[in-house]
Image: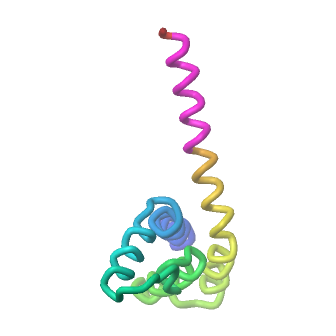
Amino acid sequence: MSTYFELLLVTAVVVYIVALSGFTSTWLGWLSKLLKGPVRQLRPFSCAQCMTWWCCLAWLLFRHQFTLPLVAYSAALAFFSITVENVLIFLREGLLFCLRKLNELWM
């Protein structure tokens, strides 16, 4: 599998976990209770763009492929993390729309 595709998958997973799954708000809530004060964000862990950047760099280090083109690609993926988030939402909503239409046909 191409490293470029692997980085795209890392981006999709990170964006899902940080921005869409609700996990970030859950652990920030736990941290707020533990510290007895509001914690609204804790970068890079609560920022999809930051986490995409650092996770992609960690992946490149893990794969021993830390090259300028791949670092630049990682930067581009981090820059477009909001776009990836919106694409994932679009896919989810599109599938839900199709399922609702199929459900209407069968009822």
Reply yes or no: does residue 49 show up in magenta: no
The correct choice, above or below, for 105 with respect to 99 in the image is above
Q: Is residue 63 visible?
A: yes
- Residue farthest toward the left in the current orientation of the protein: 34
Q: Is residue 35 left or right of residue 103?
A: left
- Residue stretch rendered in magenta on the structure: 92-105
Identify the residue at horizontal 45%, vertical 59% (top origin). Answer: 21
Q: Where is residue 32 drawn, in percent x and y?
A: 39, 81
Between 101 and 74, the one lying in front of the other is 101
Q: Main secondary structure of the magenta part?
A: helix
Identify the residue at horizontal 42%, vertical 86% (top origin). Answer: 37
Q: Quadrant of residue 61?
A: bottom left
Q: Where is residue 60 drawn, in percent x and y?
A: 48, 84
Q: Is residue 55 visible?
A: no
Between 105 and 70, the one lying in front of the other is 105
Identify the residue at horizontal 55%, vertical 44% (top origin). Answer: 92
The correct choice, above or below, for 71 with respect to 107 in the image is below
Q: How is the image coloured?
A: rainbow
